[in-house]
Amino acid sequence: MTVSASPAPAVLFPRPSKRIRGRSIAVLVFLAMAALFFSVPLYVLVVTSFKTMDQIREGAIFSLPEVWTFDAWRYAWDEACSGLTCEGLKRGFVNSLEILFPSLIASIAISAVTGYALALWSVRWAGGFLFLLFLCAFVPFQIIMYPLIVITVNMGVYGTIWAVAFIHTVLAMPVLTLIFRNYYKDIPPEIIKAAIMDSGSFWRIFVEIILPMSGNILIVVLIMQITSIWNDYLIGVTFGGLGAQPMTVNLANMVTVTTGTVSYNVNMAAALQTAIPPLAIYFVLGKFFVQGIAAGAVKG
């Protein structure tokens, strides 16, 4: 007995065939060219840091190292001279960490509370305060640099780690407050009213309700601040003393002040050592950074 095969069911909504359009090809080509444009200098930077000076003098900047060596990395970290001191970048790395942590904690904590108050509580003169913050966010640092120097001198912290951390906190306040305020503005006010009726105080509502809802925005401002503070040069060289200069200042002194033969491999290794910490943070938290922006962390 033969069994006839049942006809295949008709597809009501067939999927359209995927075709690569000319516009998509043009976008891919442009992105590939842009990636190549930025990757070539980075490639030269990396391979040069592993070369010997004899190979560098040959002038073949795109060639791979004949002998891979970490001598330039070790010398840049332990022995390279920055000004009159020859301690490498390790002292500047410690200084950068000591500047980074208090700056992050103070700027994010104060800005989060201020943005929360402006967004969800009836603060007197809130409109004028927001306008003042908006103006301060676009004031060039060079204009207010001298008054800040006078303030830190009168505070007795000029030339120390705390002076650099204080200036980073002050300069970050306008932008971070506006970002937190815009983010918290989307929280339904009914939540705050219900919390107040449930005997919730200003700080209790912030700690128990607002902070657990702030994961995305905290990642955004965390990456912004780490990148800004770690890569800063002008504030560090202006407000940091001889023993309180961050890693970027040590790098600049190492590269620009050279006696004898310029050690390009050491300079490249020092530049990579300075750039690796914020780059690693971005690779670890980059996905959450995109999610925070998509969730409305930065809006016009």
Image: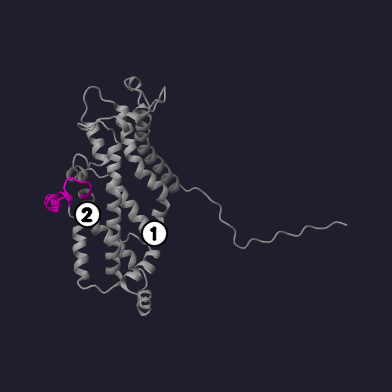
Quadrant housing the N terminus: bottom right
Q: Position of residue 64 (x, y in %)?
A: 41, 26
User: Is 100 situated left or right of 158 in this image?
Assistant: right
Residue 7 covered by magenta stretch: no
The residue labelled by disc 1 is 216
Classify residue 138 by image quadrant.
bottom left
Q: Position of residue 4 (x, y in %)?
A: 80, 58
Residue 110 in view here: yes
Our reading of the magenta stretch's main secondary structure is: helix
Residue 103 location in percent, x, y?
A: 27, 52
| Residue type pointed to by label 1 | Asn
Q: Nearer the viewer, residue 256 or 97?
A: 97
User: Residue 171 shows which numbered tag?
Assistant: 2
> In front here: 6 or 122?
122
Residue 300 in sight: no
- At x 30%, y 53%, the residue is 104
Q: Classify mark 2: helix, strand or loop.
A: helix
Which type of secondary structure does the marked residue at label 1 adopt? Answer: helix
* Residue 83 in the image: above or below residue 162: above
Residue 260, quarter of the rendered image: top left
Q: Amino acid at mark 2?
A: Leu
User: What residue span does the magenta drawing correspond to?
Assistant: 140-162
